[in-house]
């Protein structure tokens, strides 16, 4: 089975974007990995990805983030916490788990809800007070993590839309009545590996269809297809 290759030219963050993009495409289309690989390896893709990567990053960093702005200019941690995040000092600071990617999972239960009863399902440890520096470092990490998640999600969405637009220019779309037994269609798609179908059915006026993508200029299969409903 063909695997989708992510080139070493991309850094770790960009590779996470590409993984999201691959998941998005394969979630929507029953598609041969060769089609995605060919796109990834094209100069068109690499130039577009580099351009959109910068664009998305700049747009995210332009967004107002009052807490981040204050964190960058902070001089007294205690006064910052009292003004902006006073509730954080009332949450338990016990570290529950540390992950290889740097993520740290804390116990964030409020001190009044914190339980140490070993006969219950609550976490069995004493409430751990966070000092000002612990709270600041945790907030900085959360902000960085949220920015990272926002960046990878938005860039993957942009590239997924570009992929859909690419399909519109390179493929003709047809609709076939859905049937539980689609052996004829499946056999044809296996022979014509550059053609594919959407995984989810299309509904129109209580009728269910399969949407099929056929490369421009290809001979149509011996199936009952229609360009429109």
Image: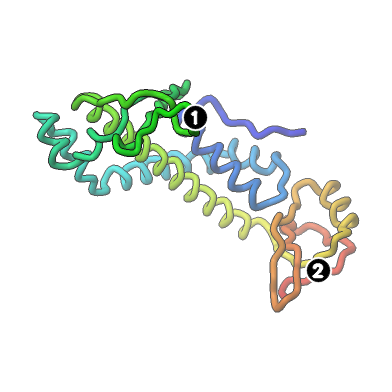
Q: Is residue 180 left or right of residue 23?
A: right
Q: Position of residue 161 (x, y in %)?
A: 52, 54
Where residue 174 sits, quadrant-wise, is bottom right
| SS under mark 1 | loop
Residue identifier under label 1: 119
Residue drawn 59% across the image and 36% down it = 41
Where residue 42 sits, quadrant-wise, is top right
Among the two numbered marks 2 and 1 on one chain, the one whose residue lies closer to the N terminus: 1
Residue drawn 53% across the image and 43% down it = 44
Q: Residues within 10 Å of mark 2 (few under 14, many from 20)?
A: some
Q: Residue furthest bottom?
A: 205
Q: Position of residue 201 (x, y in %)?
A: 72, 62
Residue drawn 42% across the image and 40% down it = 149
Asked whether the viewer can see residue 171, the reply is yes
Q: Position of residue 72 (x, y in %)?
A: 17, 33
| SS under mark 2 | strand
Q: Position of residue 133 (x, y in %)?
A: 20, 24
Residue identifier under label 2: 177
């Amino acid at each position: 089975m063909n695997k989708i290759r992510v080139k070493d030219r991309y850094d770790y963050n960009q590779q996470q974007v590409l993984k999201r993009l691959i998941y998005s495409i394969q979630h929507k289309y029953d598609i041969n990995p060769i089609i995605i690989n060919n796109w990834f390896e094209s100069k068109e893709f690499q130039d577009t990805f580099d351009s959109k990567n910068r664009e998305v990053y700049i747009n995210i960093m332009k967004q107002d983030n009052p807490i981040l702005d204050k964190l960058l200019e902070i001089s007294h941690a205690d006064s910052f916490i009292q003004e902006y995040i006073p509730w954080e000092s009332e949450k338990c600071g016990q570290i529950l788990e540390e992950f290889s990617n740097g993520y740290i999972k804390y116990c964030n239960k409020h001190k009044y809800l914190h339980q140490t009863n070993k006969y219950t399902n609550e976490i069995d440890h004493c409430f751990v007070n966070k000092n000002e520096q612990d709270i600041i470092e945790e907030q900085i990490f959360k902000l960085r993590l949220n920015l990272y998640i926002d960046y990878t999600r938005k860039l993957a969405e942009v590239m997924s839309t570009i992929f859909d637009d690419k399909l519109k220019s390179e493929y003709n779309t047809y609709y076939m009545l859905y049937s539980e037994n689609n052996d004829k269609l499946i056999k044809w798609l296996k022979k014509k590996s550059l053609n594919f179908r959407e995984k989810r059915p299309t509904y129109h006026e209580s009728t269910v269809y399969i949407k099929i993508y056929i490369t421009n200029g290809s001979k149509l299969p011996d199936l009952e297809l229609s360009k429109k409903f």
